[in-house]
Amino acid sequence: RKEVEQDPGPFNVPEGATVAFNCTYSNSASQSFFWYRQDCRKEPKLLMSVYSSGNEDGRFTAQLNRASQYISLLIRDSKLSDSATYLCVVTAVVEGNNRLAFGKGNQVVVIP
Amino acid sequence: DVKVTQSSRYLVKRTGEKVFLECVQDMDHENMFWYRQDPGLGLRLIYFSYDVKMKEKGDIPEGYSVSREKKERFSLILESASTNQTSMYLCASSFGPQETQYFGPGTRLLVL
């Protein structure tokens, strides 16, 4: 089973609509969770960390469900500038080393 | 702001050439990482380093080596470039192995 799994999409979203997607992770001992945003042909950048109690940053809301081992990202009132790939990132232990595991991303396309 | 720089944005090399990709970070981060990113495969970890002169293999180290002689600099070396190493190479750094990673702008390498 892969460490982090995401539905690649694309998620075609009308401007102004709400879009949500999940990411599942395999390691029940994972402690840190993040969402990164990657624009086309650019590097990934941190969008937000995901806390156990959930957190909100403007139009973006992230939730963590430890029991079912998934995190979610919700984008309200989508803007054209939200078009990007959203990478789910989870801590993992690989061969005794602690590090981050990146999902392949959810591609979001906001349509005028 | 954290700044991670990479020596080249675009690079074209011939099969068999030795290739050096340099990465420098200015935030005194202990940890540095090299990834490659290919369509449909996501980010794949090549090598990482937790300290000066220390290196660990990632998921796909074959055909690559690294050097970390100074804390702020992490170099990726392709001893004999091959066409299947054509890719986007991303360097990242972080304070801890499970903390937020900050990425450089990436190097698009084409091996002919």
Image (cartoon, rainbow, N blue to C red):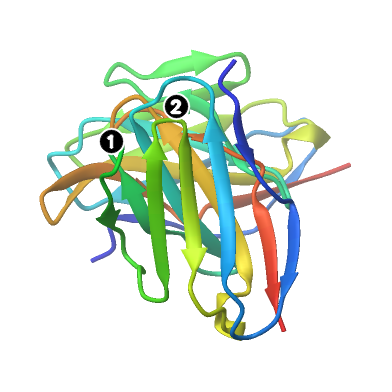
| Image: A15 above or below B20 | above
Residue at position x 63%, y 85% in the image: B15
Residue corresponding to mark 2: A62
Q: Is residue A22 left or right of residue A111?
A: left
- Badge 1 and badge 2 both on one subunit: no
Query: Label 1: chain?
Result: B
Residue A3 on image: x %, y %: 27, 56
| Residue at the limit of the structure toward the front, as seen here | B69
Residue B72 on image: x %, y %: 46, 31
Secondary structure beneath dot 2 equals strand
Residue at position x 34%, y 32% in the image: A33
Residue B10 on image: x %, y %: 76, 58
Residue A69 seen anywhere in this rendered image of the structure: no
B91 and B14: which is toward the camera: B14
Residue at position x 89%, y 42% in the image: A112
| Image: B35 above or below B110 | above
